[in-house]
Image (cartoon, coloured by chain):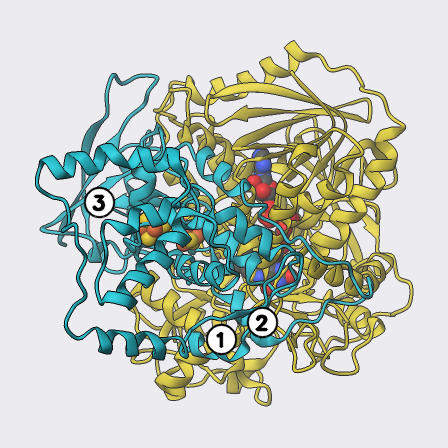
Chain colours: A yellow, B cyan
């Protein structure tokens, strides 16, 4: 058994930022299933939002309003105010840590425009902002190396909560296959998003929602799981993100007939309409048979008219992604694309100091959540681009501050080591020795297809009913899954089985939440209920695990401070 | 459909007495990446095969492996570009111990990185509430080197690391460069001093492997070259590497060719008796084998032309850091940056 004052699970922006806040004051450990610099925060390209007003007359007020509106009025406004007013300080802090930012003529941090933001608000480091931020915090963690213990390539399988008090986690040392308990006074989950349950996704292989599932299984409800954002320009079949810049620089979206179909859906803004509308338009084209390719399942991003010089100068990354990953030369041919699952708005419910809720009102003692795995909720039904790097940084720090305080006032609560280890071991043994012959990769593939095609950009009661049945069937088949590799060290086979079990568990909750929510709001779009329904649905979903493993839905009100709901038009 | 054979290095120290290769035959789908190929193998043929991956989009640095002898990122490489006569050989990256199959112990790589204070050491701030000023040109100076994704491809294929694991290695030197050339760092001079010591920039043989293998714009060898120039500009010459460069220049600029008797002594320092004695055995062996250079060093005929080249060269230096002095924030010659960017 390892023992630390504080255990942080996750070494992305949220986890690292929280750790820096406490290092030197408490005995802090970070557990991460990948090395810190491999965390998915590094994949973010576009930017991080803050009303620095380096380019124009931006204000915290405007940022707040844009975020509330972007969230389709289901974000909690007090949390959004914290997010936006702390943003400028956060960016300056990262600059002081050494993050390299692109600069203006006045030698200040440069900012660019981004969908849904009414000013030039996105601070950026060329086209790899997340990478620059993540490596900066990784550097700082090396600076504080003596004060921080990082357990890289350890996989957390269980969260230990008893009597409303969080006591530790059980983790698997991937290198040796050994299970260990990490005993702590306080625990922070900063485990990232859950987009891997979808076939077409921009998320890393690691984004399998382990943290949220462990919390859920330990008795914590999950909030707003039905809200999953789809980005309009995912590289066909891979889902890899092609940045919004492709359209910003004048790229066309065309269907199999070569028509610029956006003229039907957003005649004035055309390709530059908001993300959800463009994604839905693409999906409509595909659904109505105007998709391109042999399977008619994608549309095309046409850059040819921009010419070689402009493509290579302004959109080099897009050119290389298309070339390297699907062998398409964007100068000569249009690039196959499709909407891609991109961001998880839902997650572990927490208050503005990242303390996790046990139910609608009570807090769980010693348990905190920050970053994409949390639902605080600053993004409501639809996250604005560049707001989530910000969230991870702002709330990572807030979690650290609160935990510093809370940990000092807490004792270690006892953990039944034997019981916890054998429960974790049983879970793994069930995978190893169930004598079944169900094929792991097929279950995963069928789940991902179901989620993308039945619970994707457009949803309706009928599709979701099928999805629910399918997920149940897959969960049943999973009890007989075959894990052929029994070895101890670096057993990727066990890890992928555990990850799949998590994806199955939370996919059921996405479907349940989405099926119940009989309206269209933000990223949740139903063709059988095409309108937003504030009267009945301006509330957060909370899903609770029942003793028999089934789920129960409850709801909790949205916190409105300044902005009353209005129609969301752009 | 065309077939391809993946010949993959397998080794599980817990089970196997020694490593072996296993062949997997699969269809060569058009447009498939190596990583997706491996994922297919895992999904349909052999779930025990171990390798690392995360982002799938060439940004996290997890999936470096050796393919047909050279390190690359599996997720950004087309399988069809790799197949030679229908065969692709895949090994773990080099210069590190194998944990299992294609997974190596990266600890030496991280440990090397930690040696060079891999974080900004700033000056005191004028105003803690504002960002520090930096020009776009100054940003561009570290733009390339900050693309490093710490994939260790360079570390894997570095020839010096193969024989000397104390060498800082390409990625670590690139990390040092990142701060030496950051206008906000206050320790450029100290950093330069540190990496001119043993195992630092002068130990690189300039083979170019690291830059060829690097999947990003970091291109370590070019950065090492820049650091060396900065070291000379800053006149940190009390070390073998710098003395070697100066000695090289001295003899060639004087006589038009290398004085091979003079140079080794010049490099270790004329008053460094122990090191000079250390050179003796090599000298004697060379003498015995008849490989010693002529004892009397003569100038070449057209030595004048060589001299004029040297005097002209002085005017054209590429990256010229201006006064890097002790404790001072380095300022760089901005005109040189645009040169590098094109
Ligand atoms: C392609 C792409 C582009 C994006 N672009 C932008 C953008 O331009 N602007 C913006 O604001 N946002 C962007 N986002 C979203 C943003 O990157 C993420 O929301 C944010 O980085 C999440 O940070 P995090 O710290 O919460 O989690 P992550 O960085 O995902 O880190 C999660 C951590 O948890 C660890 N972990 C997970 N499970 C376990 C387990 N079981 N055991 C141990 N450790 C575990 C992982 O190892 C990892 O260290 C983008 C997202 C994607 C996918
Ligand atoms: S150029 Fe230098 S650092 Fe790079 S691989 Fe060769 S010896 Fe190593
Ligand atoms: S320098 Fe290049 S090859 Fe080396 S770790 Fe960085 S990105 Fe990889
Ligand atoms: S999987 Fe991330 S770089 Fe290849």
Query: Is label 1 on the same chain as label 3?
Result: yes
Determine whether the beta carbon of the residue marked 3 sits less than 8 angstroms from the nearest atom of ligand 2.
Answer: no
Determine whether label 1 and label 3 are within 8 Å by CB: no
A346 or A314: which is nearer to us?
A314
**Mark 1 → mark 3, Cα distance in angstroms:** 35 Å
Answer with mark 3 or mark 2, whichever residue precedes in sequence: 3
Disc marking residue B138: 2
Looking at the rendered image, the quarter that the N terminus of chain A falls into is top right
Disc marking residue B69: 3
Horizontal relation, residue A12 to residue A313: left or right: right
State the image coordinates of residue A172 (x, y, percent, origin top left): 54, 25
Residue carrying label 1: B337
Answer with mark 1 or mark 2, whichever residue precedes in sequence: 2
Horizontal relation, residue A109 to residue A535: left or right: left
Where residue B131 sits, quadrant-wise, is: bottom right
Residue B165 visible at all: no
Q: Residues within 10 Å of mark 2 (few under 14, many from 20)?
A: many
Q: Helix or strand or loop: what does disc 1 sit on?
A: helix
Q: Residue furthest front?
A: B296
Disc marking residue B22: none
Chain at numbered mark 2:
B
Where residue A115 sits, quadrant-wise, is: bottom right
């Amino acid at each position: 058994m390892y023992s630390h004052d504080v255990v942080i699970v996750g070494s992305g922006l949220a986890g690292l930022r929280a750790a820096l806040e406490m290092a030197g004051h408490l005995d802090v450990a970070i557990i991460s299933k990948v090395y810190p610099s491999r965390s998915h925060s590094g994949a973010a390209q576009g930017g991080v939002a803050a009303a620095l007003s380096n380019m124009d007359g931006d204000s915290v007020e405007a940022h707040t309003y844009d975020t509330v509106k972007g969230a389709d009025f289901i974000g909690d406004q007090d949390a959004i105010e914290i997010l936006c007013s702390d943003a400028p300080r956060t960016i300056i802090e990262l600059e002081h840590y050494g993050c390299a930012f692109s600069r203006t003529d006045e030698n200040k941090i440069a900012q660019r425009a981004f969908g849904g933001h009414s000013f030039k608000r996105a601070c950026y480091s060329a086209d790899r902002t997340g990478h620059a931020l993540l490596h900066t915090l990784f550097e700082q963690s090396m600076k504080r190396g003596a004060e921080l213990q990082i357990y890289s390539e350890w996989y957390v399988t269980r969260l230990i909560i008893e009597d409303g008090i969080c006591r530790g986690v059980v983790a698997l040392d991937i290198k040796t296959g050994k299970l260990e308990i990490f005993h702590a006074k306080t625990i922070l989950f900063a485990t990232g998003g859950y987009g891997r349950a979808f076939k077409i996704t921009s998320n890393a292989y690691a984004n399998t929602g382990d943290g949220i599932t462990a919390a859920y299984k330990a008795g914590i409800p999950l909030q707003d799981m039905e809200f999953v954002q789809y980005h309009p320009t995912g590289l066909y079949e891979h889902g890899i993100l092609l940045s919004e810049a492709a359209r910003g620089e004048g790229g066309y979206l065309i269907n199999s007939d070569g028509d610029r179909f956006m003229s039907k859906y957003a005649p004035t803004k055309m390709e530059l309409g908001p993300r959800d509308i463009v994604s839905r338009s693409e999906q409509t084209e595909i659904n109505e048979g105007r998709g391109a390719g042999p399977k008619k399942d994608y549309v095309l991003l046409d850059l040819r008219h921009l010419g070689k010089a402009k493509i290579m100068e302004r959109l080099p990354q897009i050119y290389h992604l298309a070339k390297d990953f699907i062998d398409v030369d964007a100068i000569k041919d249009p690039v196959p694309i499709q909407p891609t699952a991109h961001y998880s708005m839902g997650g572990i419910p927490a208050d503005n100091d990242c303390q996790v809720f046990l139910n609608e009102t009570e807090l769980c003692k010693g348990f905190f959540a920050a970053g994409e795995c949390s639902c605080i909720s600053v993004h409501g039904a639809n996250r604005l681009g560049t707001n989530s790097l910000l969230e991870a940084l702002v709330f990572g720090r807030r979690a650290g501050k609160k935990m510093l305080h809370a940990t000092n006032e807490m004792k270690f609560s006892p953990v039944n080591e034997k019981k916890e280890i054998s429960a974790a071991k049983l879970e793994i043994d069930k995978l190893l020795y169930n004598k079944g012959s169900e094929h792991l990769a097929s279950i995963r593939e069928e789940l991902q297809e179901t989620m993308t095609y039945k619970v994707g950009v457009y949803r309706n009661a009928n599709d979701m009913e099928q999805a629910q049945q399918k997920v149940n069937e897959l969960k049943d088949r999973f009890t007989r899954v075959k894990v052929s590799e029994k070895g101890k060290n670096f057993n990727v086979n066990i890890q992928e089985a555990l990850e799949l079990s998590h994806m199955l568990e939370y996919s059921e909750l996405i479907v349940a939440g989405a099926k119940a929510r009989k309206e269209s709001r933000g990223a949740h779009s139903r063709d059988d209920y095409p309108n937003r329904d504030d009267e009945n649905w301006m509330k957060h979903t909370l899903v609770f695990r029942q003793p028999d493993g089934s789920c129960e839905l409850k709801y909790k009100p949205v916190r409105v401070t300044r902005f009353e709901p209005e129609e969301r038009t752009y | 459909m065309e077939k391809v054979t993946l010949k993959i290095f397998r080794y599980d120290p817990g089970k196997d007495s020694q490593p072996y290769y296993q062949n997997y035959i699969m269809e060569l789908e058009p447009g498939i990446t190596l990583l997706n190929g491996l994922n297919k193998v895992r999904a349909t043929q052999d779930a025990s095969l171990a390798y690392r991956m995360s982002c799938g989009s060439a940004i996290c640095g997890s999936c470096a492996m050796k393919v047909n002898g050279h390190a690359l990122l599996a997720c950004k490489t087309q399988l069809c570009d790799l197949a030679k006569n229908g065969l692709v050989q895949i090994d773990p990256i080099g210069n590190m111990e194998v944990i299992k199959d294609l997974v190596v112990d990266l600890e030496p790589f991280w440990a090397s990185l930690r040696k060079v204070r891999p974080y900004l050491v700033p000056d005191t701030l004028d105003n803690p509430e504002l960002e520090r000023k930096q020009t776009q040109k100054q940003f561009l100076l570290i733009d390339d080197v900050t693309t490093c994704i710490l994939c260790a491809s360079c570390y894997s294929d570095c020839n010096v690391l193969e024989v000397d694991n104390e060498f800082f290695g390409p990625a670590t030197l690139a990390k040092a460069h990142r701060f030496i050339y950051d206008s906000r760092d206050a320790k450029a001079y100290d950093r330069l001093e540190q990496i001119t010591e043993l195992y630092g920039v002068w130990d690189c043989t300039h083979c170019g492997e690291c830059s060829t293998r690097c999947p990003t714009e970091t291109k370590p060898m070019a950065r090492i070259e820049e650091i060396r120039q900065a070291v000379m500009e800053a006149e940190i010459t009390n070390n073998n590497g710098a003395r070697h460069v100066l000695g090289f220049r001295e003899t060639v600029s004087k006589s038009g060719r290398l004085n091979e008797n003079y140079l080794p002594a010049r490099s270790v320092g004329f008053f460094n008796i122990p090191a000079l004695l250390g050179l003796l055995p090599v000298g004697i062996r060379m003498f015995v084998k008849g490989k010693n250079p002529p004892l009397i060093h003569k100038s070449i005929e057209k030595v004048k032309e060589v001299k004029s080249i040297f005097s002209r060269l002085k005017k054209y230096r590429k990256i010229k850091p201006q006064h890097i002095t002790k404790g001072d924030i380095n300022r760089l010659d901005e005109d040189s940056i645009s040169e590098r960017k094109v």
